[in-house]
Amino acid sequence: MVQVREKLHPLHIAILTHMVQVGVMIFVLPRITAENFGRNGWLSIIILSSVAIGSIFLISAVFRLGKRQSIFAIAEDVVWKPLLIPIYLAFAGLLAFTGCMVGKEYILIFQMIAFPTTNSMVFKFVFDVLALLLLFKGIYNISKAATIFYFLTVWMLFLLLFYLSEFEWSRFTPFLFRGETAFAHGSVEIFTAFLGFHICLFLVPYVENVRTMFKAVHYGNLITTFTYLSILIVSFGFFSYGQLLETIYPLLDLLAYIELPFIERMENFLFTFFLLSILITSVMYFWMAQEIINHLLPRMNRKWISVIVVFVSFVASYIPGLIRQVEVLLRWLAYAELLFVFIAPTLLIGLLLIRRLRKGDVHA
């Protein structure tokens, strides 16, 4: 009997996209938008979300022209595979190290607010073990776990209602993007909060309909945009502009404002729920790195590839010991990833056109 391979459901893809996008940037996003876009900087999210939508359309064009072929097949149909191996390895390393640093930054923040005397690598070890166990289950089970984690955390958006009593519309001045601004640098930095939608580059072999998959990715990006906008609007209405500039982690300060008689230090309790989202983000970056290495070494057991990816990343996480070092390193990794998100689809479209010219599909 032929076994039918399971396909990813569009709902799972949408939620998976959202969960990968929402990483550690969410804790600092209100401050960064205020620093780089000034007053009413929350509006920048709408602009940059539109850029993300354009990037997803660019990636979808690759698979429309490539007729559902994987990115590996498209590239290797024109370029000699040995020439691509260094690029594959570099990108796999970039993805794996990004997933590692996302987890490391979360762990360092968690250590700072809850367990300042405990070695952060103890928590990182447990975090990576959880990530490895999810990797062993494969993309279908990861997507289902992401859906469950999403519904376990989405209720936290309703906590924004706690701030209505302190919310002041007067803080939304008629001045748009006034103050100390850095539009170019800020756009790049804030756009990294939307990174994660490029998982669709690797999901094509696991879906039934590519067009439906990209619709789901767009929906996931819209969920992320709504989440970011909700937090930013509340932050700009709750804090003064000056407070936003001085607060390191505005979202944590928002959580600290919530007080319940039966829970002390509510922010510590709520912060642990973000572990579910950060875990999925790290796992999917590890998974993308695993997909690349699996393409290079198809005969190697996927579980061993998972072990190698996570173990090497864990060892590499010893390099940055301070949270500031992790933030800087993660920022540069995000910039490199950002270049890939725009350059790779463009190059792939170029290769597809070259292939068509070679096969005589396009005539001068």
Image (cartoon, rainbow, N blue to C red):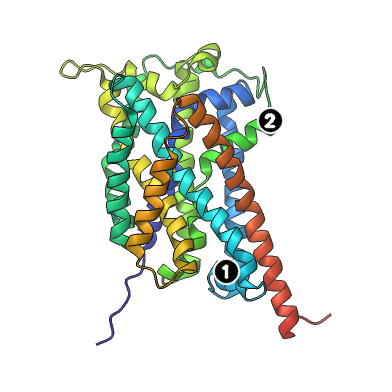
Can I make out residue 278 in this image? Answer: yes
Tell me the amino acid under the disc marked 2.
Phe
Which residue is depicted at the point 67% across and 66% down? 349
**Which numbered disc covers residue 63?**
1
Neighbor class of circle 2 (other Cα within 10 Å; few <14, some 14-19, many 20+) is: some
Q: In this view, which residue lies farthest toward the bottom? A: 1
Tell me the amino acid under the disc marked 1.
Phe
Quadrant housing residue 178? top right
Q: Which residue is mark 2?
A: 183
Alpha carbon of mark 2 to alpha carbon of mark 1: how far?
Answer: 33 Å
Q: In this view, which residue lies farthest toward the left? A: 262
Which quarter of the rendered picture does the C terminus lie within?
bottom right
Can I make out residue 19 in this image? Answer: no
Relative image position of residue 286 (x, y in whole percent): 42, 52
Relative image position of residue 243 (x, y in whole percent): 50, 12
**Which numbered disc covers residue 321?**
none
- Against 169, residue 153 (above or below) is below
Question: In this view of the protein, which residue sits in the foreground, 190 or 173?
Answer: 190
User: Could you say whether the residue bearing mark 2 is in a helix, strand or loop?
Assistant: helix
Which quarter of the rendered picture does the N terminus lie within?
bottom left
- Against 362, residue 260 (above or below) is above
